[in-house]
Amino acid sequence: QGRAGEAASRFGSAANEARRLAGSADSADQREALEVLALRAEADRGAAMIAAKDYSGAETLFGVMARTHRDDPRAQALADIGMGAVALGKGELDLARVRLTAAATLHFKADEERPRALVLLARTYSELDKKGEKGARRLARAYLNDLFKFYPASDHAGEARELLATLQ
């Protein structure tokens, strides 16, 4: 948990620096790229908080992200993914399922965030399978297969392969 807390702090610093640089960017494209970097660093900060089991802090972070970036599909997707990951971490599998399904299906303009949502959905259904929910293993595999089909080069493909091996 100590390393995760340190990572959360560093991601927060990276997000702040990206936002600072965006304010003095030379072009609109550069500003947008730095704003995306800041959002992703914030999302990674939230993921590190979840790893440290700081669920309250992560919920606050993702809630603020959703409220302050209402018109940004990427921010909304990252916030839904983050809130889904918090729910998964807390064992609130029904809430995780709802949040992650929203992230995977509703945020069409943030397609690059979809692989993370698919892996977390598969993890959620894997946990539901362990609790005896009928059809959950099949759904977990289906989400992973979507990832392999549409995002084979994703950063999350390796994690997805590991998870699929546990679902055999």
Image (spheres, rainbow, N blue to C red):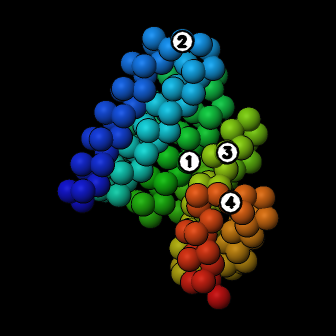
* The image quarter in which residue 134 lies: bottom right
Query: Residue 11 location in percent, x, y?
Result: 35, 40
Foreground label between 1 and 3: 3
Q: Marks 1/3: CA distance? A: 12 Å
Give the residue at x 69% y 68%: 144
Q: Is residue 91 above or below residue 130?
A: above
Between 3 and 102, the one nearer to me in the picture:
3
Q: Earlier in the sequence, mark 2 or mark 1?
A: 2
Q: As shown in the figure, which amino acid type bears the numbered disc 4?
A: Ala
Q: As shown in the figure, which amino acid type bears the numbered disc 2?
A: Asp
Q: Determine which of the numbered discs, if any, sits on residue 153 in the image.
A: 4
Packing grade of label 2 (10 A; few <14, some 14-19, many >=20) is few
Q: Helix or strand or loop: what does disc 1 sit on? A: helix
Foreground label between 2 and 1: 2
Packing grade of label 3 (10 A; few <14, some 14-19, many >=20) is few
Foreground label between 3 and 2: 2
Give the residue number, with chain letter if any, for mark 2: 26
Give the residue number, with chain letter if any, for mark 3: 112
Q: Is residue 66 above or below residue 3?
A: above
Give the residue at x 59% y 49%: 99
Can see residue 140?
A: yes
117 lies left or right of 88: right
Q: Earlier in the sequence, mark 2 or mark 4?
A: 2
Between 65 and 165, the one nearer to me in the picture:
165
Foreground label between 2 and 4: 2
55 lies left or right of 5: right
Q: As shown in the figure, which amino acid type bears the numbered disc 1?
A: Ile
